[in-house]
Amino acid sequence: MQRYFVAKEQMTEKSVQITGDDVKHISKVMRMDVNDEIVCTDNDSRTVKCRLVSLTDQEIVAEIIDELQPNTELPVKVTIAQGLPKGDKLDLIVQKGTELGASAFLPFSAKRSIVKWDHKKASKKIERLEKIAKEAAEQSYRERIPEVYDVRSFSTLQQELSAYDTVILAYEESAKEGEQAQFAKVLSTVSPGQSILIIIGPEGGMTEDEVDQLRANGVNICGFGPRILRTETASLYALAAISYHFELMR
């Protein structure tokens, strides 16, 4: 069944009002009509099953026929701080990271980031990533759309570390040295409801100076298994491991 996100003010006790691009998707792409059923969520705590009752070019109204409890969000809030990668890798990271349960994405510029975002074009890039996150959240039956933050400098990122209960840096040198258990040890100290920041370097990884600064700030330096992962793979590995630890093992 197709799923759509709506603003809280579009959902009343008995009905849902759908506007914007989703109107075209429902009527033209999916070719739905009166009496067809969809699922709507308010991007917070309410998900409902609806039946379409009226369709126009500007608005679709659906009556609520059931309250749902999908319970598809990770028990912990995971933000992916991603060093700016080349090409369209960030699109992939946001799409697949959303499917795997990330609550937010925080792109940042590291010393080895080859890509530099033009300030004038940054808002359009973020807008594109937000659309990717929304579509991926609908496809994967998420209850919330992950937030995509504006790009940060490395120094700004460090200033925001205290906002998270646990901060982890994926460091390939730890994997090369044979360290494999630290990530699991750190996850064992995290409780449901807490927040985790996963820092992933760009192609080429983080510099020793950046790692030293993060370590001095109390960041957990972890290898992600015995193999060296690409920058677009590391966050997906982390999210899958977190899902296994907090969902499948309990």
Image (cartoon, rainbow, N blue to C red):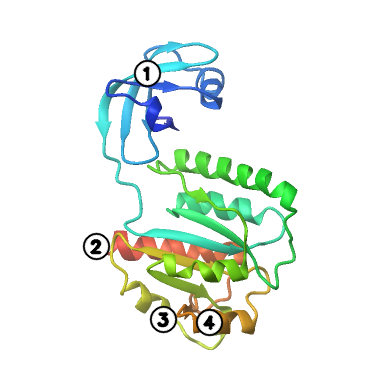
Q: CA distance from mark 3 to mark 2?
A: 20 Å
The residue positioned 52% from the left and 52% from the top of the image is 96
Give the mark, 4 or 3, whose residue is nearer the N terminus.
4
Q: Which residue is mark 1?
A: 62
Q: Which residue is mark 2?
A: 250
Question: Nearer the viewer's eye, disc 3 or disc 2?
Answer: 3
Going by the image, does 41 lie left or right of 173? left
* 8 over 124 or under it: above or below: above
- Under circle 2, the secondary element is loop
Label 1 close to label 2 by CB (< 8 Å): no
Q: Which residue is mark 4?
A: 175
Q: Which residue is mark 3?
A: 182
Residue 116 falls in which quadrant of the image? bottom right
Q: CA distance from mark 4 to mark 1?
A: 52 Å
Dot 2: few (<14), some (14–19), or many (≥20) neighbours within 10 Å?
few
Where the N terminus falls, by quadrant?
A: top left
Question: Nearer the viewer's eye, disc 3 or disc 1?
Answer: 1
